Amino acid sequence: MGSLIVKNFFRFLVVFLLQAFVLMSLTISYPVLDNINIIIYPIVIMMLPLRTPNALILLIAFALGILLDLFYNSPGVHASATVLIAFIRPFVLSWLEPRGGYTVESSPTMREYGSSWFILYASILLFIHLFFLFSVQAFTFVYILEILLKTVMSFIVSMIFILIYMYLFNPKE
Amino acid sequence: MQNLFQFFARFGTTILFIVLEITCFTLIVRYNSGQKEIFLNSSGFYSGVLLENYNKLVRFYRLSSVADSIARDNARLRAELRFATIDASFKRDSLIDTVYRQRYSFISAQVISNSVNQIDNFITVNKGSAYGVQSGMGVINDVGIVGIVRYISRDYATVASLLSSQTRISASIKRNGFFGSLVWDNNSTQYMHLTDIPKHADIIKGDSVITSGYSSTFPKGIYIGRVEEVGYESGSSFYDLKVRLATNFNNLSYVYIVLDKSRPQLDSLTNALIH
């Protein structure tokens, strides 16, 4: 129990620092692939243990989002998207419930429930996160095509980074 | 009372969710209207100090390219020393008195935080009001222009980058002096659009675009970029020129803040016109 909290706190810290100091300034500039954001911090929310109280997930998401907003110069933008995926996480989890049900003590990880399950789970949350994030950033749907393009491009690159993270550390909880 | 507890047990998470989202959107809207922004942006004290320490670490790895850029900058300054001055020569009878008075001076600053992939991008630099930086001053680097100072604290300043939906910079074509405004279309970090130049002007691909000097933000004649594509705004009598920027926003490290000594005079003249 204690180690579970320590591990999740440690992940929060590492992913936050990685996002704020490395990935924020990493931009990919090709003529077509301009303006890609690499966003990996939603994995902090994705990988919280299954029995984490929903209210606690929301508060963690809010804290993470606000901290990143300080670095992205965008008060509230990242926080609103992170809080949103924290809210829908339980619904996505119950929708993707495997035939045998979840193990109560586990975390939604690749090692526990297989890579295809995890990729589907992470994709849904990441896509919603990015789409909401870019919509809030633009604050109008006039740019809907740009928003969608940016979402898809950033989604592909971010997903690759998330999978690299998962294969590198392959955490159990 | 028991009903109240049941209600919270059932809808507590949803209520918390709504409260948090309202908090977020309040922040977003306040931020967009520019109010209290200074409190949360990266010129704020804690993230400023953190970013600066991080930058000290990273700067070491960039030393060679920084040295190159300083050397190039020195060479350019040596060649162009006169561009920072006002031509105060006048003719009286047959006596020609040629004097150049200093008009602009420059404060060098280090970039400690930078973004390029937002809709309104900001750059934080490590010089603030303690060094005489004021909001509204122009920011340039060794190859082109960078942005305009928006918010200042004692030791840091936040610069609105050219890459912002609100940017309008007065720029002109070097070859024939036609001027228009430079805007960004949220699309690429390398290109901006020069609009409001009438179609009867003769513009060709490759024309140099420079600052017009019609505001006290930037001195006249600072290089901005090159016309890459000559287009037309449909249904209007103006060009829509695609300009390739000289400044590379992806690796900014040193910039110069432009201090205009004539600015108080120009401002008071403008104010006199308004009242």
Image (tube, rainbow, N blue to C red):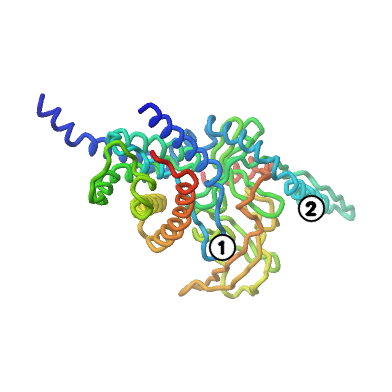
- In the picture, measured across the screen, residue B44 lies left or right of residue A100, that is right
Quadrant of res B22: top left
Q: In terms of secondary structure, where does tag 1 sit?
A: loop
Disc 2 residue type (three-letter) = Arg
Task: Name the residue: 69% across, 51% down.
Answer: B219
Disc 1 residue type (three-letter) = Tyr
Chain holding disc 1: A
Camera-nearest residue between B169 and A38: A38
Q: Where is mark 1, residue-wise?
A: A30
- In the picture, measured across the screen, residue A169 lies left or right of residue A93, that is right
Q: Quadrant of the N terminus of chain B?
A: top left
Camera-nearest residue between B79 and B217: B79
**Which disc, if any, is residue B76?**
2
Q: Percent from the top left, x then y, of residue A119?
A: 38, 54
- In the picture, measured across the screen, residue A164 lies left or right of residue B82, that is left
Q: Percent from the top left, x then y, of residue B194?
A: 57, 64
Camera-nearest residue between B50 and B129: B50
B155 relative to B70, above or below = above
Q: CA distance from mark 2 to mark 1?
A: 30 Å
Task: Name the residue: 10% across, 29% down.
Answer: B3
Q: Percent from the top left, x then y, of residue A44?
A: 40, 40
Farthest residue in the right direction?
A: B94
Task: Name the residue: 50% across, 40% down.
Answer: A71
Task: Name the residue: 40% across, 29% down.
Answer: A3
User: For the residue carrying disc 1, how many other residues have a C-alpha within 10 Å: few (<14), some (14-19), or many (20+)?
Assistant: few
Farthest residue in the top direction?
A: B1
Chain holding disc 2: B
Q: In terms of secondary structure, where does tag 2 sit?
A: helix
Q: Percent from the top left, x then y, of residue B188?
A: 54, 60
